[in-house]
């Protein structure tokens, strides 16, 4: 096995970072971070059933009834998949759509968004009234957790501080301001998002540069990807329509989301 293959095998397929607390599904023995596969197991169960006794591997789709972890060569711990799907209480179709976006290539940018124009026109100095709601939904989707207020306030606090300090300091080129912005956001988000940090920063930059509200941005983004998804409303729990995502990075489909066979 060469160095590249070794590096890939040591990375979690879900968070894309080095594996923390190594764990395996009991049938296929694919390896994940324990917390990542545990969260996946909470997310996958069908909202049409309160309990489910298996989880489908995100890589091979094989069904497993437990997660093996803390294996030391002689003994191990086992987590049985038999739990309530708490995620359905807050995880809307909009969350599902945003999570799926992180498993496809987004391209350089959405077609009608000129990111450099945003930086050259100094529009980054203006607060974005939709940013809190957008970042909250994004972090909830990525972590599959409802209570993310502390993380959101931390990231937005770093951005607000950067914006205030920028107006008092000396002027630098738009390109350097862009690099500085992406660096400080990445530093704030990385402890929580790990391997998804760089993609999150790029997505955030596209959103603020668009100057669109969340609903309009979602429509533009979906059209750009060529997905066929009906109107997204937070309270709407209908299934997503089938679509053909661009260059999937990990096998992740509406079938996985809804737990259908």
Image (cartoon, helix red, strand yellow):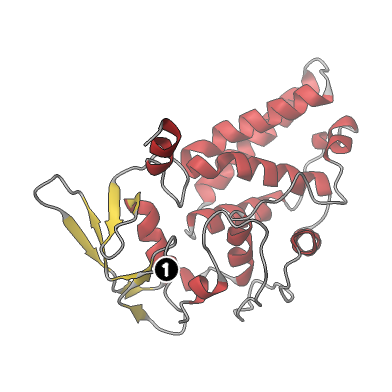
Front position in the image: 170 or 259:
259
Tell me what residue is drawn at x 53 percent, y 51 percent: 149
Tell me what residue is drawn at x 73 percent, y 73 percent: 228
Query: In the rendered view of the protein, which quadrant contains the N terminus?
Result: top left
Which secondary structure lies at badge 1?
loop
Front position in the image: 197 or 145:
197
Image: 171 above or below 47: above
Where is residue 39? Give x, y as percent.
40, 59
Residue found farthest to the top: 170
Mark 1 Cα shell of 10 Å, populated few (<14), some (14-19), many (≥20): few
Where is residue 254? Give x, y as percent.
56, 73
Q: Residue under label 1, please give it.
A: 61
Where is residue 82? Give x, y as percent.
28, 74
User: Is residue 207 toward the left or the right of residue 146 in the image?
Assistant: right
Residue 261: quarter of image: bottom left
User: Is residue 198 toward the left or the right of residue 224 in the image?
Assistant: left
| Total count of labels | 1
Image: 220 above or below 31: below
Tell me what residue is drawn at x 42 percent, y 39 percent: 5
Residue found farthest to the bottom: 48
């Amino acid at each position: 096995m060469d160095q590249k293959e070794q590096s890939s095998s040591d990375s979690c397929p879900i968070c894309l970072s080095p594996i923390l607390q190594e764990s395996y599904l009991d049938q296929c023995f694919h390896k994940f971070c324990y917390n990542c596969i545990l969260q996946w197991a909470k997310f996958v169960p069908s909202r049409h059933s309160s309990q489910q006794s298996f989880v489908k591997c995100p890589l091979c789709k094989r069904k497993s009834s437990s997660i093996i972890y803390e294996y030391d060569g002689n003994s191990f711990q086992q987590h049985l998949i038999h739990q309530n799907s708490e995620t359905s209480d807050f995880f809307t179709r909009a969350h599902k759509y945003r999570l799926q976006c992180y498993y496809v290539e987004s391209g350089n940018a959405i077609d009608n968004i000129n990111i450099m124009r945003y930086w050259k026109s100094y529009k980054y100095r203006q607060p974005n009234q939709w940013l809190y709601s957008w970042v909250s939904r994004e972090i909830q989707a990525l972590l599959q957790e409802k209570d993310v207020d502390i993380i959101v306030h931390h990231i937005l606090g770093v951005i607000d501080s950067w914006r205030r300090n920028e107006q008092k300091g000396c002027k630098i080129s738009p390109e350097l301001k862009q690099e500085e912005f992406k660096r400080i956001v990445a530093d704030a988000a990385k402890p929580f998002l790990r391997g998804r940090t760089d993609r999150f920063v790029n997505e955030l930059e596209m959103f603020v540069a668009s100057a669109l509200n969340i609903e309009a941005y979602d429509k533009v983004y979906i059209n750009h990807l060529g997905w066929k998804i009906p109107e997204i409303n937070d309270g709407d729990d209908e299934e997503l329509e089938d679509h053909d995502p661009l260059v999937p990075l990990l096998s992740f489909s509406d079938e996985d989301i809804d737990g259908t066979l």
